[in-house]
Amino acid sequence: MKANFISYLKERFPLSFHLPIILLFYLAIYLFASLHSTNIIFSIRTLLGFLTVFLIFFHLRLFDDLKDYYKDRSRFPDRLLSKEVITVNQIKYASLIVIGLEITFSSLMGFQTFLLYLGTLSYSILMYFEFFIKDKLKKNILVYNFSHQFLIILIGLYIYTVYHSTIEAINILYLAFLINMFLIFAMFEFIRKIKDEKDPHFDLSYVYIFGRKKFSIIIFSLLCIITTLSLFTLTSITTNPVLYLLQIFIVFCLFILSILYAKRSSKVSCKTIKISYSVFMLLILLLIVVPILVLKHSSLEFLIGW
């Protein structure tokens, strides 16, 4: 059982990829929550918050595999779950254990933090049941994507209370930041599933659903909004023009790549688009984490307690 589950993790939730991404995501939101505080505090509470967020992303993976089991069994017969190397009941059991750990960690951090965790958990359960309107959601894939990525905002509110213990001091700037995170993950979801026309699972790609040109327009529209919001939030962190120019330069390069991709240029493959936009996502997160740490490095506090 243990060996099979480790193999399942490597296949469906590889830690080498997910751990650094989720850590960077958590740090970006946690540090932005500290922006108007005198000190940046890292404590046991910070660690428990991260562990909870990491487990939330993990239980989302488990939920997705359970939700799509019958469909994926025929589409992806080589997966461990499809071959029953690991069973549906074992995935259900693992989900309960993971959620139990999340509840335990969150319950230690105060009423408001726990309440926001419960809201996040409840929303993930609604996602699992497709909000009980699966057929209607499937008719509009944009609504489907955005409705699922809304969970990012709830996780952001949860992280805010991990830092502040209360949501009462939240401001418009932080909410704009969370909306930006929501759009970044929505864009990443589109990019993550990009596939070449020759791929046997091309019909699962948003390119298949929208067509190459419309897909490119959607992605670049999201990119423009994200860039605007990112520059807006970046101005609250630093006035260094080099960081602004760096972001603008990356966006310009993505714009050129998107045009070439829409025109079916042989120089721009699906892999190129996927890697380029993924790098942009990481850059946005780093442009939050690094400047804040540089700006407030002298006010870092590492506490053994809460």
Image (cartoon, grey):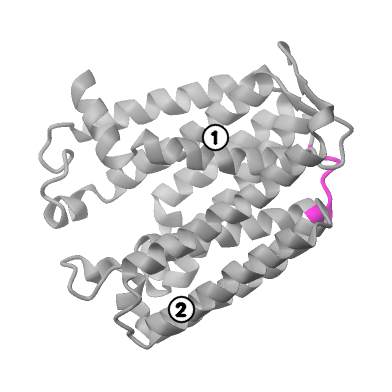
Quadrant holding the C terminus: top right
Q: Bin the neighbour count of mark 2 within 10 Å (Cα to Cα): few under 14, some 14-19, many 20 and up.
A: many
Q: Amino acid at mark 2?
A: Ser
The image quadrant that residue 6 belongs to is: top left
Numbered disc 1: secondary structure: helix
Dot 2 or dot 1, earlier in sequence: 1
Q: In the image, which is nearer the foreground, mark 2 or mark 1?
A: 2
Quadrant holding the N terminus: top left
Would residue 252 be seen by someone viewing this image from the given angle?
Answer: yes
What range is drawn magenta here?
167-173
Q: In x, y percent, where is residue 197? A: 22, 76
Does residue 271 lie above or below 264 as drawn? above
Give the prevailing secondary structure in the magenta stretch.
Answer: loop
According to the image, label 1 marks what residue?
Answer: 53
Would residue 33 be seen by someone viewing this image from the given angle?
Answer: no
Q: Bin the neighbour count of mark 1 within 10 Å (Cα to Cα): few under 14, some 14-19, many 20 and up.
A: many
Q: In x, y percent, where is residue 249? A: 62, 70
Q: Is residue 139 left or right of residue 249?
A: left
Q: Which residue sits at x=39%, y=27%?
A: 96
Q: Of the numbered discs in the image, which one, if any, rests on residue 34?
A: none
Q: Is residue 169 left or right of residue 201?
A: right
Does residue 226 lie above or below 151 as drawn? below
Total marks placed: 2
Q: In x, y percent, where is residue 146? A: 52, 63
Q: Which residue sits at x=55%, y=36%?
A: 23
Q: In x, y percent, where is residue 184? A: 56, 60
Q: Is residue 286 left or right of residue 264?
A: right
Q: Amino acid at mark 1?
A: Val
